[in-house]
């Protein structure tokens, strides 16, 4: 009985590309009483491994917390697999705002003490006695109420790149740190203010709202489905997005763009930037924000020391990092001593309306028209295949290939095959291939740049 991964991340990435299947990235959670979390974990692994599910899932006696991806073709079979359990029937699945076939590259189902680490030891605390759920329109309306205090229940490295307007953003590294700080700093407003909370997908607010009600807060509200569901409703209903910037996500993408506003800075030069990266030094992996210029100059590293390390022979690098445990150090984003540009304001535990930052708009977009989407990548010859869905492209055109992982890549078409034959032009309905100096994903879009 296989209850573990047998392929490396690199092997899995190649298999995903070769399979040619569009994958969906989604998340969900459920609080429930699970008598045997280990047995539950094993059942899930067996069922989901057969459905090609990849992701990071935590189970505990208090429920399940899951972020994962799966082939779109297997979506309904997956839905059946979770609804076989009574407590997950009709559960809301948060579909990612931006899709990436490589968001997860292995299936990990772990048994934890809790699905959200809260540091609480209180048998009288009822996690099911939650605050009032609000949909996007209701949330927007309550944001404008002068008697509302809006609190971001995420960590500092999440809220820095995107947040709701007027929100208080605790300067904390973990969820468990935020609970006692918020309680202490807002203790005078347990009766006279409305406490409005939000997080990525709703799971942290579910527990936090119950906690604050337990501590005597009378008017507790939470954003139903978190930022992910809020964004879906805003688009579906044509509402104004009160969330600006990017939504941090805990997978390979590290973020989903919600609006074009850039509300953070590169941690090495201070330029407007909201792109997270992990230091490429295997012995560091510090999570920080790095602009393209610094990424080039620093070779993807957080410091000159790490740059020198990555140029050492592999055996020497292994010897340096042997026995060293980074732990949560990688999440000290914006605080590490090696970063030359950090947040100047220390707001840990200080709950005052923070100074409004000027949201910097992204540079004017390149004029382009949509052509089609990536359908396959052949790694050995480094050739990308695209389905032309609209308009046309021809040899000599400058094209843009865009994707969450691929980024934005421009190049000029010098030669191509159209429906397996050398042709000058490809039109709607054609399949074309051409050589690329980089890997593409099935979620990548193809555009033609206009003069």
Image (tube, rainbow, N blue to C red):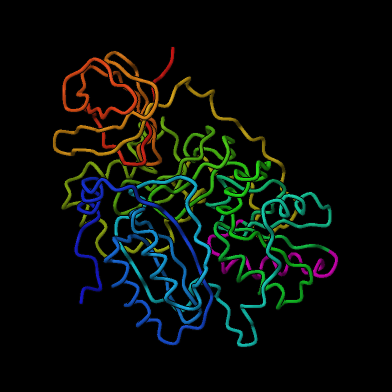
Question: Where does residue 34 sit, x and y in percent of width and height?
Answer: 46, 83
Q: Nearer the viewer, residue 373 or 159?
A: 373
Question: Where does residue 24 sit, x and y in percent of width and height?
Answer: 39, 52
Magenta span: predominant SS is helix
Please give the name of the residue rendered at 65% of the width and 41% of the height, measured from the top-left corner.
Answer: 238
Looking at the image, how many numbered discs can be counted on the residues?
A: 0
Please give the name of the residue rendered at 36% of the width and 64% of the height, measured from the top-left corner.
Answer: 77
Q: Does the magenta portion include 181?
A: yes
Please give the name of the residue rendered at 16% of the width and 53% of the height, measured from the top-left corner.
Answer: 315
Tell whether 72 sits left or right of 9.
Answer: right
Q: Residue furthest left?
A: 380
Please give the name of the residue rendered at 47% of the width and 38% of the height, measured from the top-left corner.
Answer: 268
Tell whether 274 sits left or right of 349.
Answer: left
Q: Nearer the viewer, residue 442 or 177?
A: 442
447 above or below 177?
above
Question: Where does residue 185 sit, x and y in percent of width and height?
Answer: 74, 65
Q: Nearer the viewer, residue 261 or 231?
A: 231
Quick one: quadrant of the N terminus?
bottom left
Q: Does the magenta portion include 179?
A: yes
- Residue range of the region highlighted in magenta in the rendering: 171-192
Q: Residue furthest right?
A: 192
Quick one: quadrant of the C terminus?
top left
Question: Where does residue 18 sit, x and y in percent of width and height?
Answer: 21, 46
419 above or below 10?
above
268 above or below 424?
below
């Amino acid at each position: 009985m296989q209850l573990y991964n047998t392929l490396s991340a690199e092997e899995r990435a190649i298999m995903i590309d070769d399979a040619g299947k569009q994958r969906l990235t989604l998340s969900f959670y459920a609080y429930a009483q699970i008598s045997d979390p280990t047995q539950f974990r094993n059942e899930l692994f067996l069922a989901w491994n057969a459905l090609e599910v990849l992701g990071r899932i935590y189970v505990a006696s208090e429920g399940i917390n899951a972020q994962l991806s799966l082939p779109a073709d297997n979506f309904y079979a997956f839905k059946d697999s979770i609804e076989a359990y009574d407590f997950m029937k009709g559960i809301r699945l948060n579909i990612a705002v931006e899709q990436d076939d490589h968001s997860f590259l292995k299936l990990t189902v772990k048994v934890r003490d809790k699905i959200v680490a809260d540091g609480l030891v209180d048998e009288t605390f009822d996690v099911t006695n939650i605050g009032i759920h609000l949909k996007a329109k209701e949330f927007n309306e309550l944001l404008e109420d002068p008697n509302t205090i809006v609190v971001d229940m995420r960590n500092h490295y999440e809220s820095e790149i995107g947040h709701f307007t007027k929100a208080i953003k605790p300067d904390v590294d973990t969820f468990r740190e935020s609970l006692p700080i918020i309680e202490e700093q807002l203790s005078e407003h347990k009766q006279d203010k409305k406490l409005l909370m939000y997080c990525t997908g709703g799971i942290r607010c579910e527990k936090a709202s119950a906690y604050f009600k337990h501590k005597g807060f009378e008017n507790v509200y939470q954003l139903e489905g978190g930022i992910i569901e809020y964004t879906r409703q805003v688009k579906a209903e044509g509402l104004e997005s009160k969330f600006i910037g990017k939504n941090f996500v805990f997978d390979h993408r590290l973020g989903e763009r919600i609006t074009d506003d850039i509300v953070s800075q590169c941690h090495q030069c201070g330029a407007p930037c909201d792109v997270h990266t992990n230091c490429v030094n295997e012995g560091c992996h510090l999570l920080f924000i790095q602009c393209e210029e610094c990424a080039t100059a620093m070779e993807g590293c957080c410091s000159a020391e790490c740059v020198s390390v990555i140029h050492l022979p592999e055996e020497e690098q292994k010897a340096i990092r042997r026995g060293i445990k980074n732990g949560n150090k990688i999440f000290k984003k914006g605080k590490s001593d090696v970063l030359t540009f950090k947040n100047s304001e220390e707001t840990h535990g200080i709950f005052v309306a923070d100074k409004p930052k000027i949201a910097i708009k992204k540079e004017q977009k390149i004029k382009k028209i949509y052509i089609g989407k990536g359908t396959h990548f052949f790694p050995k010859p480094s050739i990308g295949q695209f389905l032309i869905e609209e308009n046309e492209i021809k040899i000599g055109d400058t094209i843009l290939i865009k994707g969450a992982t691929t980024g934005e890549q421009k190049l000029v078409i010098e030669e191509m095959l159209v429906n397996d034959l050398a042709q000058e032009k490809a039109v709607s309905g054609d399949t074309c291939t051409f050589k690329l100096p980089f890997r593409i994903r099935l979620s990548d879009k193809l555009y033609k740049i206009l003069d």
